[in-house]
Image (cartoon, helix red, strand yellow):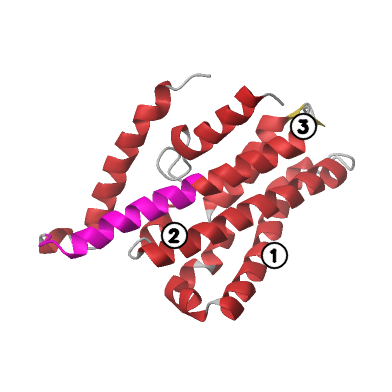
Amino acid sequence: MSFAAVLSIIVSMVFVNNFVLSKFLGLCPFLGVSKQTKIAAGMGIAVIFVMTLSTALTWLVYRFLLIPFNLMYLRTITFILVIATFVQFVEMVIAKKSPLIQRALGIYLPLITTNCAVLGVTVLNINSFFVNGRPVYASFMLSLLQSFFAGVGFALALILMSGIRERLELNNTPKSLRGIPVAFIIASLMSLAFMGFKGFVF
């Protein structure tokens, strides 16, 4: 696993192929919890945690259960069950450690279960680091690395969005654009800005 490969994954997941701003996955929590930076940061950390640990378990399940028993067609439902389990765990931890963040995240915290960005990264890892049912060299580590920085990219987009929306609250936004309409405009402009990273080559 070369330094160039690691750097390529980091830059790709955070900037070039950002799950929110490039692949447009996970827009529901992105728009729903990006009103305050503190809440957005909490959600971002939760997503990084769930993405990374879900990847570890789904990789092991796929490699040592689904492939040997020729059950690859159960990949999606298996991955959803793993993700749902981790979300429940994260929700219990947040409820114990920070009830304020749990109340602020509201319905969006359990919605990590159906966050297509979390499912998307686990499927992407299998597609990227398995060839003909066999893991490539350092497949497990590459999958964890890719998942972690996909979560970092998600958190970065969430925090940037929340900072902009907090500033907009201090301005006289036209009534017809307040709330979700202006959030979509901001997300579109951020997506265009992140397209500037498309030319990065290592």
* Secondary structure mostly taken by the magenta-highlighted segment of the chain: helix
Q: Which mark is residue 85?
A: 1
Secondary structure under the numbered disc 1 in the rendered image: helix
For the image, the number of numbered tags is 3
Expressed as whole percent of the image width and height from the top left, the position of residue 79 reads 69, 52
Expressed as whole percent of the image width and height from the top left, the position of residue 26 reads 47, 52
- First in sequence: mark 2 or mark 1? 2
State the separation of the CA atoms marked 3 and 1. Answer: 26 Å
- Is 157 located above or below residue 29 in the figure? above
**In this view of the protein, which residue sits in the foreground, 182 or 194?**
194
State the separation of the CA atoms marked 2 and 3. Answer: 32 Å
Q: Which mark is residue 188?
A: none
Q: Amino acid at mark 1?
A: Thr
Task: Check disc 3 and report the residue beneath it.
Answer: 138
Q: Residue at x 62, y 39 (%)?
A: 146
Marks 3/1 in contact by CB < 8 Å: the verdict is no
| Pair 2/3: label in front | 3
**Dot 1 crowding, Cα within 10 Å, few <14, some 14–19, many 20+:** some
Task: Check disc 2 and report the residue beneath it.
Answer: 29
- Is 98 located above or below residue 147 in the figure? below
Quadrant housing residue 197:
top left
Q: Which residues are magenta?
A: 153-173
Expressed as whole percent of the image width and height from the top left, the position of residue 11 reads 51, 32
| Residue 104 in view | yes
Q: Residue at x 68, y 53 (%)?
A: 54
State the separation of the CA atoms marked 2 and 1. Answer: 19 Å
- Whether residue 144 appears in magenta in the rendering, the answer is no
Secondary structure under the numbered disc 2 in the rendered image: helix
Query: Left or right of 2: which side holds 118?
Result: left
**Dot 2 crowding, Cα within 10 Å, few <14, some 14–19, many 20+:** many
